[in-house]
Amino acid sequence: MDRKILSNIGLINVTMLYIPEHIITELSELSCEAVAGKLGLEVCRHKMKCFMHDDHNPSLSFYGLNKEKWYCFVCKKGGNAISLVMDYLNVDFLHACEWLCTSFGFNCLEDKSAFPHLKNLNIKKYVPNKPVKPFSINVAEWLLKNTSLSDKGKEFLCVERHIDSSVIESLRITSIDDPFPIVEAASNEFSRDILLDSGFFTLSRGKLFFKLFTPCLLLPYFDIDGKMIGMQSRYLGISHNAPRFQFLSGQKTRLYNMPILKTMTAGEDLFICEGITDCLALLSSGKKAVAVPSATLLPRLDLCRLRLYKLHMYPDNDKAGKNAFDVLRRYFVNHGILLQREHLPEDYKDYCEYYIDCIYGK
């Protein structure tokens, strides 16, 4: 059985067979702080800002005698050194092990003669410690149907950002100011187990609570055919301890506004943004746009769908914006796709600010 057949039936890459079990054990016991340093992440007092959401206060902590474990108290993700590399670089188990071996000087390949007959091997597929729950589309759809854009949501989107109402409606954006009526109504619609499994609700002292920080926008994600595949919240309150954006724990990273691709033809201009706010501004100005949650969370399979279009990007006018553009440009270059940089006037931080002042103002 060759590599291609193994790949087609969903088994791990054959190279995985030559990584000894004791090496995998050693890799899993590496200091996650040291690994974060190798990845170029900034750690302070055993904490850092989580790369899986828009984190303004360090919510990811390292713990254990050797700081061999990590955990984010906002998005609830965590694990060991291998899972840290997998999540940050968005690679599979095999490539994460190979990266760690290269970075820390392990010889990850045993003598292949130890495996003379591949067909006789007991091939095991890597299984994460905690299986990822599927996205609860029933609860998410119920939330959208039972919420609307509140006054706080209208203030943020329509008054402050001047987002076109037709864009808000087409993307099915709603908001929640007071979560308690939602919890009560959801409890009458679904069983407690279903609500807890959905990721939208949590249990404390025997009482259900809404898990996302409120007041917030609800920003649903859809696949190219319009099926809901995820949801993101945008906090609208004043607490500095609440994350600005939240995803459901375990939710896969996807491209925002994928259904727009069905309205496009090959060679059309398409703008790609880092974050949803600029995407909404671009759509409101009449341009076609999609968004990635962040430059460190690239939905690679979705991005490959963009090869048919002329891609443009307005990076933010700061170091982070430049880095985000460079990450995306390198990704697209490696796939034979050109990403053209569009320049904002220096006085504007991002496209949304430019849109409000120059595009909407005119």
Image (cartoon, helix red, strand yellow):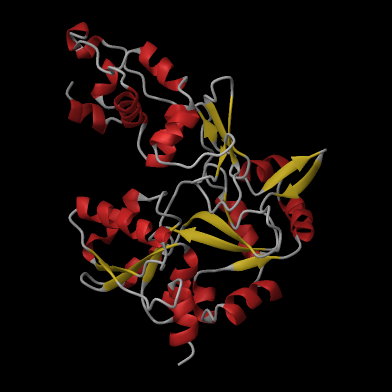
Count of residue discs: 0
Residue 273: quadrant of the picture: bottom left
Of residues 37 and 121, the one nearer the viewer is 37
Considering only vertical position in the picture, is 265 above or below 131?
A: below
* Residue 245 horizontal/vertical position (percent): 57, 56
Quadrant the C terminus occupies = bottom left
* Residue 6 horizontal/vertical position (percent): 24, 26
- What residue lies at 45% left-to-right and 22% top-to-bottom? 30
Residue 239: quadrant of the picture: bottom right
Q: Can residue 198 be seen in this view?
A: yes
**Seen in the image, is 102 located left or right of residue 45?**
left
Residue 249: quadrant of the picture: top right
* Residue 355 horizontal/vertical position (percent): 45, 81
Considering only vertical position in the picture, is 294 above or below 316?
A: above
Q: Is residue 150 visible?
A: no
* Residue 84 horizontal/vertical position (percent): 45, 34
- What residue lies at 58% left-to-right and 75% top-to-bottom? 157
Considering only vertical position in the picture, is 33 above or below 148?
A: above
Quadrant the N terminus occupies = top left
- What residue lies at 46% left-to-right and 46% top-to-bottom? 252
**Seen in the image, is 180 located left or right of residue 45?**
right
